[in-house]
Structures are given as structure tokens and as C-alpha cells.
Image (spheres, coloured by chain):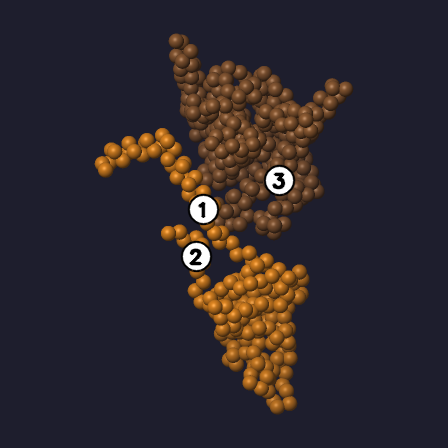
Amino acid sequence: MELVVALGLIVFKVAFLIAILLLLPLPLTWLERKVAGHMQQRMGPMRVGWHGLLQPVADGIKLLTKEDHIPAEADRFLFKLAPILALAPPFVVFVAVPFGESVSVLGTEITLYVSNMNVALLFVFAVIGIEVYGVIFGGWAANSKYAVLGSLRTCAQMISYEIPMGFAVIGVVMLAQSMSLLDIVRAQADVWNVVYQPVGFFVFFVAGLAEAQRIPFDLAEAEGDLGAGFHTEYSGIRFAFFMVSEYAIVLLVSVLVVILFFGGWNGVLVPLPPLLWFVLKVAFFVYLFIWFRFTFPRYRYDQLMAIGWKVLLPLSMANIIITGVLLGAVAAP
Amino acid sequence: MSRAQYRVGTWIGWGFFADLANGLALTFGYMFSRPVTMQYPDQEKWLPYPRYRGHHFLKRDEEGEIKCVACELCAQICPCDCIEVVPYEDENGKRHPAKFEIDTARCLFCGLCEDACPADAIALGQQYEFSSFSSRDLVIGRDDLLAKPGKAATGGGVVAARLNTKKDVLVETEETQGYDWWRNIRRT
């Protein structure tokens, strides 16, 4: 009986998570277009619903009813596989991501995470790496020069950014002495990691921008020079998959930044509910992503590689060494 | 400040991403500025200046008689050959157009017909909303041209409008000449 309840709870949590992740791109696209509009002294969507609130729904209906076109020369299997490969990993990753300690509903404690893995961080990086295959396959299978150029850039970009990103979080792991995201947040109860690891935060955030393929590092889709990059040939629901995946990764990177460097659900000064603190911090970073998008120009291909290999990688390595030395010095006496 | 100091300061600024922060501050400031959007069919619309060359109209004289003497000068001068005039003579021996058709689908609104007219009978007015699903509907006949609104005394402003507006809204505006397009963009 207890097993059934526990299983039911997990199924409920997973379903809830999937529902949230599938629905969040709707307000996020609206927000992005609104912010873009106002930053450019326009109004953004205004026609559908109050201040265009229903615009994402209209867009969704449009995408669902559009023809799902597969180019004649495309590799049909890979072409169909790619959107799924891009969409699934961000969803899977959230299994390991905690959103809070626990809440008590009707007398039972319900934890705000699906699982507390002891190697959660490793799991996150391992699974999110698969997402890149979706982008690469999508570009390759379409048999279009723009799409191939897009996925070519993605390959290079991912090689140069996954490594600094992985190195950047090692400092956090050293501080928390654990790879469990839950323990990492608990270790930040007093002081947030960003105080001890500003360089690590910087490297992680820049690499996260590249990971999410957002401006200034959105070379894979660079609409100015590549049409729409890897998803040039995609239409209808498959295109929507890529969009949802993009927003899920934006959300994931924001959540990871908050968990790893900004104390997760630990608040400061103002006593708010932990979950609210968490949501507010994540919302801030999502806004930061949008804000960056409409402020910065896109980096050139070689500049991106130079930043990745010549700046971020040495910085993250130095960060590890300095953190280790300081930790040793503190622990020595 | 010497040049060397300035250069060092710039480098320090780059080290702390001063240029990026400047850009972010600028866009953030703009986010709370007023949009310059004119919500055209929904809420407001642009009322053009009186000199604007919009839809043609035919004038009547004091007796209510049509001014046009059907000399066909407008049809002659029309660069896109979109005016067709067929004259007739009434019982008083005056020439008038039996048929006066303007194909507004072909018209380029140059206003040469207005310049050429010896009887000051045709002019281009303020109306600019006459799109249609059929190009046949854009051939405007004599009686329709007589019924079109004439030159307005005022213009150059934004007036209230609704999407379901069927009639031509010609609202007298306080703000006539000299609409400040840059009112929301200019930042002190």
C-alpha cells in the first residue's frame, strides 16, 4: 500500500513537472516578445487577448495546424528523431533538479523534488549533453546548406563550452563536498556560493548562455546569416518542439545558476516562502536571458571559440586551483 | 586626464565589462519609455495633412451643378491612363461628364489631374482607406466621386478610430499642423 502511494506521488510529481515545462514556454514567448517590443519602443503583441496575452495560444494553434513538411532529400528518420532528441533531455534533467525542501499537504510531507540523486550534477551534465545531438541531427538531416552550417557551428560551440561549464561547477562541488544539488543548496544556507565563486559563476553563466544557444551565442540559428540555422527546414509541430526545448534549456540554465551559485531557495533579509524565493530568482535570470538577447549583438564564430578556449577554460581551471588551495589553507590549522 | 590614464581607465572598464553594462542599462531604460506605436485600426489613426493626396473627389458649384466640363484634360495628362471621361451636352448647352471613372487601382496619386483641371472640378482629398478585395470595386464612378469627402481644413494629427469603422472618420483635431513624431523618442 505504501509503495502504491509513493509510486503514485512520483507519477503525480513527474506529470506536474512535465505540464509546467510544456506550458511555461507560452508565457515565456509572450514575455520575450513584450520585452523585445518595449526595449525597441514598440508594444509587442497587442491584438489577441488583453495586451496579447493569448498570442502564444494562437501561435500554438497555428503551429499545430500547419503542414508538417519534410524536405524531399532529407534523411527522414533523423529528421523525425531530431526534435524528440532535442526536446526530451531538458525534461529528463528536471528529474534531478530540486525546487525546495518539502511542503506538508494534508499532514503528509511532500518533497519538492522527484529524486535526490547523489550524483545529480553529473547526471544533469550528462543528459543535457544529449540535447546537442538533436540540434546536430536536425541540421544534418535537413540536407540544406544553412541547416548544416548551423549544426556545424553547434558542434564547435558545444565542444568549447561544455568543458568550461563542467570545470566551473567543480568549485561549487568542492565547497559543498557533494554532487547532490540538494546538498549544494543546503551548504549555501549562510553564504551564497556567488560570494566565494564569482569567477565560477561568470564562467558558468557565459557557458550557460552558449549552452542555451541564446544571443550573444546563438550561432546555431543566427537568423541574420543562416536563415534560421539548424531548424531552417522544420515547420509545424516539429519546429514547436525545438522552441519548447530552447525555452526549457533557458529555464534549466537559470535554475542551475540559482541552485549552484545563488543559494537556491535560501532567502536573504526578506522572509518569503522558500519556493517563492526560488521562483523569483529563476524569474530574474530568465529575464536576464531575454534582456541580453535584445542588448548584445551576436559574437562571430572565431570570437566565440576564442572566448571559450582562451578565456573561459583558463579562468575555470584557475578557479579550481585557487579554490582548492584556499580550502586547504582553511582546513590546515 | 592624460591619454595614457584614459587608456588605462578604458582597459579597467573592459575588465569589469563596463561597455556591456552600459548597453544593458540603455536597453533597460528604454524598456520603460513610452512606445511610439500608433495602434492604427484599433484605437487611433493618422489624419493626414490637408495637402495630402488621397482619394479623388469631384466638386459642385454654388448651384449644386457638377463643376466638371468634361474637357478630358485630366484624362489626357494622367500618366497611368486611369481616368475615363465621356461628355454630354445638357439642355442649356453645357458640357458635363456622362461618365467619369477613375480606376484607383491604377492611379498613382500624382495629382496631375488636379493641376490640369481648368474648371477646378477634381481634387485629391484626405481619405486613404479604400482597400478592397476586388480590383473591380476600385473603379470609382461619377456619382461616387461626387459623394466623396472634400479637402479638410485640418489635418496632421492622430484621431480616435475603431476597427469596425465603416464610414470615414473626419474628426476636427486641436493638433493640426506639426505633429511631433519624435515626442516619445526624444530623450533629454
Tell me which residue sits at (37%, 52%) in the image: B188
As measured in the structure, the alpha-carbon distance from the residue carrying label 2 to the one carrying label 3 is 34 Å
Type of residue at label 2?
Arg
Could you tell me which secondary element the residue under label 1 belongs to?
helix
Q: Which label is found at residue B30?
A: 1
Nearest to the observer: residue A11 or residue B38:
A11
**Where residue B164 appears, x then y in whole percent?**
64, 62
B81 with respect to A307 (left or right): right
Return the residue found at the far right: A1
**Where residue B84 appears, x then y in whole percent?**
61, 73
Q: Quadrant of the N terminus of chain A?
A: top right
Q: Chain of mark 2?
A: B
Q: Which label is found at residue B183?
A: 2
As measured in the structure, the alpha-carbon distance from the residue carrying label 3 to the one carrying label 1 is 24 Å
Type of residue at label 3?
Leu
Chain A, colour shown: brown
Chain B, colour shown: orange
